[in-house]
Image: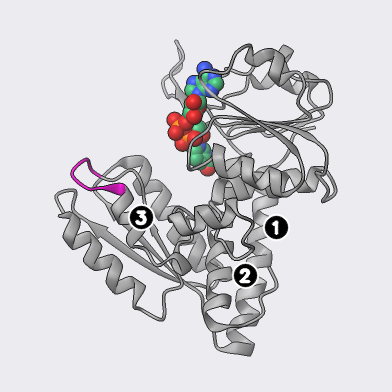
């Protein structure tokens, strides 16, 4: 079975739009998201445009801040301070990567943890690791988890889950979320010995590596659920445009897996939907209103 992430994201965005309409009507609360883009990176520009459009479509406030690549770290930190203090903004996202002269960690640590809808502030990272239900959780792993919960009727308890990749953005928070769902979690990375053998034991495989087609069909346990986070642009001979492919050799793995996400159309669309979801959650906490997401 192919997991349709686009359809799942559409369902989630509809749910979010209904919740926003309810919050506006009954609590006069309109969740607001500020997205800060530094520089001209073409991929980042596309992401930021999509985030702004989908925020508005959900009935939320969208504030875009475009800064020149030469902006100083101090100017960026001053903008974040202003956004931290703005009561109409409940979520702040600084699009990564930042130019080399800016200290990414310093920037992320300046964002008010209550508005940190990317979930990268150390307080939210620590909160997720220590079981704080109020921690804001990174969007991509949240999207993967929602897709997995749908596949397992809401119960992942006892499943052997393998996360390939240990980045702060995907791998580590993904492993924490699966642990929270009572999976037996293995984290594999570039130094893991005999990864194919480790993979063959997994009921759930989440691949977040950034290597096109690395996970082969014969690594997959029959019936396993495979979530492919990888987004790789591959230029094939005879094709004029680069193609997007995941970290899993899709056709091979789809023959063996119980369910698998495609690339594109799998995890990707869930990421922005989860960003909107985090913003609504942050807005409800700020206004001390019981949320329904
Ligand atoms: P990263 O480069 O920060 O981390 C990659 C991880 O893979 C590292 O921990 C490394 O140890 C591991 N790794 C590298 N080579 C390996 C090997 N041969 N065997 C096992 N592990 C190996 O990447 P990231 O930010 O976590 O992103 C991973 C992929 O997911 C990328 O393709 C990225 O574009 C994609 N991504 C997608 C979304 C989305 O919304 N769908 C969001 C974030 C990242």
Which dot, 3 or 1, sits closer to the camera?
A: 3
Q: Nearer the viewer, residue 280 or 51?
A: 280
The residue sitting at 35% across, 78% down in the picture is 86
Q: Secondary structure at mark 1?
A: helix
The residue sitting at 56% across, 55% down in the picture is 137
Q: Position of residue 235 (x, y in %)?
A: 43, 18
Q: Position of residue 259 (x, y in %)?
A: 78, 32
Residue extending farthest to the front is: 130
Q: Secondary structure at mark 3?
A: helix
According to the picture, the residue beneath numbered tag 3 turns out to be 108
The residue sitting at 33% across, 49% down in the picture is 105
Q: Which label's residue is closer to the chain start, 3 or 2? A: 2
- Looking at mark 3, is its residue's CB closer than 8 Å to ligand 1? no
Q: Residues within 10 Å of mark 3 (few under 14, many from 20)?
A: many
Q: Position of residue 249 (x, y in %)?
A: 63, 18
Q: Is residue 61 left or right of residue 77?
A: right
Q: Is residue 196 left or right of residue 50?
A: right
The residue sitting at 66% across, 22% down in the picture is 250
Is 31 above or below relative to 43? below
The residues bearing labels 3 and 1 have C-alpha atoms spaced at a distance of 30 Å
Q: Secondary structure at mark 2?
A: helix
Q: Which label's residue is closer to the chain start, 3 or 1? A: 1
Q: Which residues are magenta?
A: 99-104
- Residue 100 in magenta? yes
According to the picture, the residue beneath numbered tag 2 turns out to be 17
Q: Position of residue 280 (x, y in %)?
A: 57, 70
According to the picture, the residue beneath numbered tag 1 turns out to be 11
The residues bearing labels 2 and 1 have C-alpha atoms spaced at a distance of 10 Å
Q: Residues within 10 Å of mark 1 (few under 14, many from 20)?
A: few
- Looking at mark 2, is its residue's CB closer than 8 Å to ligand 1? no
């Amino acid at each position: 079975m192919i997991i349709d992430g686009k359809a799942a994201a559409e369902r989630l965005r509809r749910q979010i739009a209904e919740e926003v309409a309810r919050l506006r009507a009954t609590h006069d609360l309109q969740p607001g998201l500020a997205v800060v883009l530094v520089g001209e990176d073409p991929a980042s520009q596309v992401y930021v445009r999509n985030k702004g459009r989908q925020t508005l479509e959900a009935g939320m406030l969208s504030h875009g801040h475009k800064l020149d690549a030469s902006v100083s770290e101090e100017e960026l930190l001053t903008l974040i301070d202003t956004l931290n203090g703005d009561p109409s903004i409940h979520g702040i996202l600084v699009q990564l990567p930042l130019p080399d002269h800016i200290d990414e960690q310093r920037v992320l640590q300046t964002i008010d943890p209550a508005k940190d809808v990317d979930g990268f502030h150390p307080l939210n990272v620590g909160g997720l690791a220590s079981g704080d239900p109020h921690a804001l959780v990174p969007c991509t792993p949240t999207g993967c988890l929602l897709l997995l919960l749908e596949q397992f009727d809401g119960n992942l308890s006892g499943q052997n889950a393998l996360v390939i990749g240990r980045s702060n953005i995907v791998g580590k928070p993904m492993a924490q979320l699966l642990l929270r769902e009572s999976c037996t979690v293995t984290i594999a990375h570039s130094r893991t010995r005999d990864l194919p053998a480790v993979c063959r034991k997994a009921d759930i495989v989440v691949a977040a590596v950034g290597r096109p087609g690395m996970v082969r069909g014969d690594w997959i346990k029959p019936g396993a659920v495979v979530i492919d986070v990888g987004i790789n642009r591959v230029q094939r001979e005879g094709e004029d445009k680069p193609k997007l492919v995941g970290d899993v050799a899709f056709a091979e793995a789809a023959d063996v897996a119980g369910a698998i996400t495609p690339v594109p159309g799998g995890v990707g669309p869930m990421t922005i939907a989860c960003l909107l979801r985090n913003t609504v959650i942050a807005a409800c906490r700020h206004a001390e209103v019981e949320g329904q997401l």
